[in-house]
Image: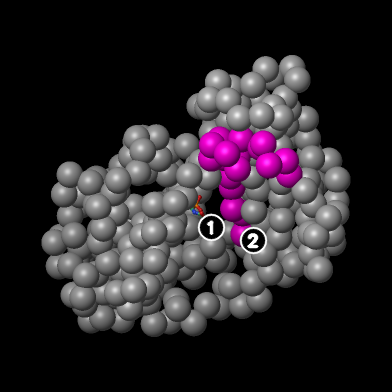
Amino acid sequence: MRTVYVNGEYLPETEAKVSIFDRGFLMADGVYEVTSVLGGKLIDFEGHRVRLERSLNELGMQKPPAFDDLLDIHRELVRANGIDEGMIYLQITRGSAGDRDFAFPDEETTKPTLVLFTQNKPGLANSPAAKTGIKVISIEDIRWGRRDIKTVQLLYPSMGKMMAKKAGCDDAWMVEDGAVTEGTSNNAYIVKGNRIITRQLSHDILHGITRAAVLRFAREAQMEVEERAFTIAEAQEADEAFITSASAFVMPVVEIDGTKIGTGTPGNVATRLREIYLDESMKAAV
Ligand code: PDD
């Protein structure tokens, strides 16, 4: 049984409880982070911590009292659960005011809820999907206008994942005004020649922590990076496509809406970037 963390306490998962009035549950009034663990160490912890603080600020949500102890809490959960490869899920909500009300509760009396738990995924770095690549479909992006804030409003991304599964695919790329925004839970890229193309940062996409690292490694390896929007048609004619996220790292995409990308197998750029990303981030893991 997992040991999880709730508001200052480490507990067996069956004993961890959150109120039915919690605003995360009633209003999706919460933010989250997913940090991967490789070799028992945290990948890009500082990037996730900084983005979490930004999400809280953008929503006017106060930090939980344990905010400054987050690194220790992550490490303790890794230790207590013997995680070698996997993820740590963290969620902060605006807490429970003991009733349902659209107005935010008084910060003096209602403290945020902080929950963390581990997900054990042996073999995460050596995923078989990285060797074959994944297939995606495109769907309309009908999410709200602040996708740069990592909120727990994940109903539409979940529906997108189910639409993909129903179509015999692995994931969905979302399209707005004719251009790809991002994947259901990852950032989207295409490769043309030696040039990596991915949508520019704005309120339209999540500012991926893996994205920032991968673009830095790509530039260091003298690859060209162009941050701009692209269409599904352009992606279907690209040499390669891939996604990035804390749980998928760099994952090749070999088919979009039934059209094979390049040779229909993982491309050289995606494969190389995955290797560099795993090597470099494991070296820097804490
Ligand atoms: N998802 N875009 C969206 C919509 C995401 O949900 C995620 C992450 C990303 C990639 O961000 P990062 O590289 O910081 O993980 C992009 C996490 C992994 C999830 O929901 O499980």
Q: Nearer the viewer, residue 112 or 96?
A: 96
CA separation, marks 1 and 2? 8 Å
In-image side of 95 versus 30 (left or right): right
Q: Estimate how packed mark 2 is, as few (under 14), some (14 to 19) or many (20 or more) residues with alpha carbons within 10 Å.
A: many
Part of the protein shown in magenta: 18-37
Q: Nearer the viewer, residue 147 or 157?
A: 157
Q: Amino acid at mark 2?
A: Met
x 41%, y 55%: residue: 157
x 29%, y 74%: residue: 167
Q: Earlier in the sequence, mark 1 or mark 2?
A: 2
Q: Nearer the viewer, residue 30 or 56?
A: 30
Residue at disc 2, CB closer than 8 Å to ligand 1: yes
| Residue picked out by circle 2 | 87
Task: Indicate whether 85 appears above or below 222.
Answer: below
Numbered tag placed on residue 246 in the rendering: 1
Is residue 255 at least partly visible in the picture? yes
For residue 3: magenta?
no
> Residue most toward the front?
99
Q: Give residue 82's quadrant in the image.
A: bottom right
x 55%, y 66%: residue: 278
Q: Are marks 1 and 2 in contact (CB under 8 Å)?
A: yes
Numbered tag placed on residue 197 in the rendering: none
Task: Indicate whether 218 appears above or below 145.
Answer: below
Q: Nearer the viewer, residue 240 or 181?
A: 181
